[in-house]
Amino acid sequence: MALQLQQAQLGPMWLYVAAVVAVVVAALALWRRPGWRKAAVYVLLGAGLAWGLTGWRATVFQAQRMPAAWEGRDVRVKGVITEMPQPVARGVRLRFQVEQALSLQDPPQAVPLPQRIALSWYGDTPTQGLRAGQRWEWTVRLKAPHGERNPHGMDWELWSWSQGIQATGYVRHGPRDSPPNWLKQTGYAQVAQWRGHLHRAMQAPKDASQRQRDSFGVVQALVTGAQSSISRSDWQLFRDTGVAHLVSISGLHITMFAWLAMAVVNLLWRRSPRLCLQWPAPVAAAWAGLMLAAAYAVFSGWGIPAQRTIGMLCVVVVLRSLGRSWPWPYVWLGVLTAVVLVDPWSLLQAGFWLSFVAVGVLFATQPQDRNVPDRRWRHAGMRLLREQAVVGLALSPLTLLLFGQISVVAMIANLWAIPWVTLVVTPLSMLGAFWPPLWTAAAHSVTAMVWLLEQMVTWPVAVLYFAQPAWWAGLAGLLGCLWLVMPWGWRWRALGLPLIVPMLWWQSAVPPWGHFDLLALDVGQGSAVLLRTQQHSLLFDAGPQWSAQSDAGERIVVPGLRALGVVPTAMMVSHKDRDHAGGAASVQQAFVRMQWMGSGGVPCQAGQSWTWDGVRFVVLFPFEGSSPGKTTKSNATSCVLQVQSHAGSRALLTGDIEAAQERALLRAGADVQSDVLLVPHHGSKTSSSTNFLNRVQPKVAIVQSGYRNRFGHPVAAVVRRYQERNVNLVSTPSCGAAHWRSWSPESVLCERAITPRYWSPAAPE
């Protein structure tokens, strides 16, 4: 299955069907043949069956994708809200099951839309509110799922695929649109309705402070599994201190719930001799605990940690009911296989690996002496300390590979946070469903926990950031850490230390002296470009700001720089527009020693220049003495930067200058000729004038814009100008992040072409 997930493009369906049929026929033919070779053959047949079934499912699902002809067009749809709506910046996000889709033309025609879509409702919601199970009829504008693609960044298209979503969009409810029509409340998605009812009942008081609101969001997440209720600042704090697993529905919470349910049922069952004669109390308690825990897991969202926990509990309960037992690897591998069979794409999710590796390590490293009295407080404390050290060390390579960081304080934080969340926060949160004042107590306990975590994260080197290593270095580091935690002598464990070194010392390749490379990040409708020399780096613009709580600097730029092992020497913000400067504050907060130039820092001025590692940087615009007036557009003040390698290759970064500034540069006699051009103003019709392009003579031009953006960038007329001059024009929506190198000035490499996958749009050739 993992092999099939590496395919760049899917094959025809008949190929996968033929593979499944061939495997089944071969297995039946070998069924009665003896010999040791049969086991090996069955392993190969099993692999072929898994590959064929996964490909078959993928082709069926891909056939239901969003029709390209209907992207960006208004459609009238009728259907049901299938999940609890999630509040987001400026609106609400919801899942919708399409029952009918019609065009707006007269007469209306049926539109072949995917059944499951994700919608956003911006602005004030209807008076009756948006609830799971409601049937609505409304006008929507849809597009295929499309996310930014950057080195080591999140694959949002994969996430949409794994969730069964093949179209995203928003509800149109303006004065010129047909009004949304609420039809009725149905009995569909009953569990989601219960979750929504409980989630609404757990809202913070209206006069609560922001900290109290954030704490109530953590309580909501613990009870209903609504991870979006946790603020971004709290998520970052929990990740930095290594306790993020405690504030989501983890296996620990479900196991605790099952244990409590078993204890209560066992106590009550023993009070009835008649029931005990029919079914032993331990067996009845085990099955009751399993069923109640499964109900809680389904209610809270049925994530991968929940699936793993319920699967393992189910195997253990069944075996004990039959009077049998399996070695732990059989249980572990059996549940892992079941989870992957149900959802092959879970292999590419961080939660899958963190959950199964943590449990597997705990099983494998249990002490052999079973006579240790673990019930005593002293031994229980030592066992908790040991388990935290084992899990923390074993998962460090995974957190580095998945998130690019290692929390040094995680072990200390978990020592007190695990019992605090397990014994205080979670019980109060759950019992609040029966007595709501307990939710306030739970929120106060979250506030106390956050305060202590905030103190810990300020400690020196509380969090270490590393460049994300190559797969072989990461695999070696994982094996080395697993070797170190095995229950062997220290002489044997020490053999794992050399395997860890490549992972920690890994650095991405840097340009040779006198050369530089350029990485135009995919940040949507905005701009962020990384320029690297041998020992220095410059960030030109920092991406857009999407809301008061979210910007590209925090979500894309900073994680991308850290994954590459880059600490920028300086940042130049071309001008103050939000799509260029929106992420600057987040970048500055992450790299406090970085020099800030341009808007918000040392102003740009034509003639400024410096040299790093044999590479020359020159500011060409704005000119000396020109100060923007009150009516001057911010685009007219954009910094224009030219970078030249020792061999003469050049890059020209233009911000949002328009035709007037382009003419001013030419009149001033600026030598703008360059090999690669960051297309001015994202390819708007007011820029990239004919004379300017004739003087620049670029071989490569890069457009940073949003997918199907409302401005139409790059406009068709501008695209034609570049095509007429045989310029290799690439845009980030189809290319992803664009890589350009001064020692190979005629070529550009697209991130989507580096790691192509069948669930993502193909990069241009």
Image (cartoon, grey):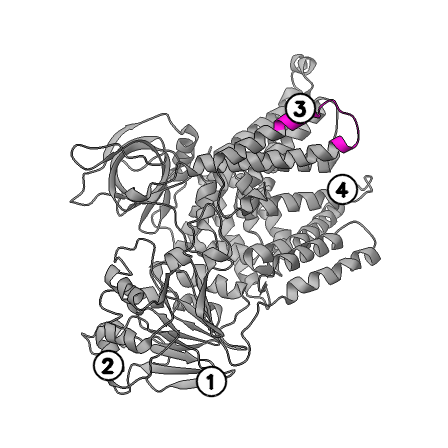
Q: Is residue 272 visible?
A: yes
Of the pair 577 and 732, the residue shown nearer to us: 732
Is residue 119 shown in magenta? no
- Asked if residue 606 is positioned above or below residue 284 in the image, the reply reads below
- Asked if residue 192 is positioned above or below residue 212 in the image, the reply reads above
Task: Tell me which amino acid carries mark 1.
Answer: Thr
Of the two numbered discs 3 and 2 in the rendering, the one whose residue sits closer to the viewer: 3
Of the pair 226 and 581, the residue shown nearer to us: 581
Chain-order first, disc 3 or disc 2? 3
Is residue 36 shown in magenta? yes
Chain-order first, disc 1 or disc 4? 4
> Residue 374, which numbered label?
4
Measured from the top left, where is residue 561 in percent x and y?
50, 66
Task: Tell me which amino acid carries mark 2.
Answer: Ala
Contact (CB < 8 A) between labels 1 and 2? Answer: no
> Residue 473, which numbered label?
none
> Residue 28, which numbered label?
3
Q: Is residue 301 visible?
A: no
Q: In this view, does 220 lie to the left or right of 19?
A: left
Of the two numbered discs 4 and 2 in the rendering, the one whose residue sits closer to the viewer: 2
Q: Alpha-carbon distance for marks 3 and 2? A: 79 Å
Q: Alpha-carbon distance for marks 1 and 4? A: 64 Å
Q: Is residue 615 left or right of residue 456?
A: left
The residue wearing badge 1 is 611
* First to last magenta residue range: 24-38
The residue wearing badge 2 is 664
Quadrant occupied by the C terminus: bottom left
Task: Tell me which amino acid carries mark 4.
Answer: Asp
Q: Of helix, strand and loop, which one carries label 4?
A: loop
Task: Tell me which amino acid carries mark 3.
Answer: Leu
